[in-house]
């Protein structure tokens, strides 16, 4: 198994480690708090909200066959409208 680590990743990790060491040496009580259940690297940016497509797909999976029934009815209705218009305008 190989591990590809570039110089940018090493630089980021070294900065994070240096920041952790600086924080630990400046406040000895914080090291007791940091060693509890908190992670060492925190994500500063919140997770973006899921897209509309992702929400629709999740909804379709949850509802199961109901979505397929509605899709089938929609296709049948559209075909009916097109056939009806073709019949009326012949």
Image: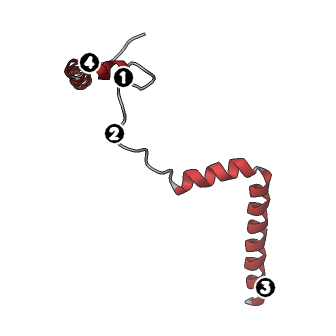
Q: Mark 4: which secondary structure?
A: helix
Vertically, is 50 above or below 72?
above
Name of the residue lying farthest toward the bottom: 89
Question: Going from the N terminus, do you reach mark 2 or mark 1 first?
Answer: 1
The x and y percentages for residue 4 are: 33, 18
Q: Residue at x 73, y 78 (%)?
A: 82
Of badges 4 and 2, the one in the foreground is: 4
Side (left or right) of 62 relative to 1: right
Vertically, is 80 above or below 88?
above
Of badges 3 and 2, the one in the foreground is: 2
Q: Which residue is mark 4?
A: 28
Q: Which residue is mark 2?
A: 44
Of badges 3 and 4, the one in the foreground is: 4
The x and y percentages for residue 21 are: 23, 18
Cα distance in 3D space between marks 1 and 3: 75 Å
For the residues bearing labels 4 and 2, Cβ distance under 8 angstroms: no
Q: Residue at x 73, y 89 (%)?
A: 89
Q: Which mark is residue 12?
A: none
Question: Going from the N terminus, do you reach mark 4 or mark 2 first?
Answer: 4
Cα distance in 3D space between marks 4 and 2: 24 Å
The x and y percentages for residue 40 are: 36, 24
């Amino acid at each position: 198994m190989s591990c590809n680590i570039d110089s940018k990743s090493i630089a980021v990790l070294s900065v994070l480690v240096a920041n952790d060491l600086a924080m630990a040496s400046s406040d000895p009580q914080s090291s007791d708090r940091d060693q509890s259940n908190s992670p060492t690297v925190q994500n500063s940016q919140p997770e973006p909200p899921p897209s509309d497509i992702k929400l629709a797909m999740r909804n379709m999976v949850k509802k199961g066959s109901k979505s397929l029934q509605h899709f089938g009815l929609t296709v049948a209705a559209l075909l009916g409208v097109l056939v009806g218009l073709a019949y009326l305008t012949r």
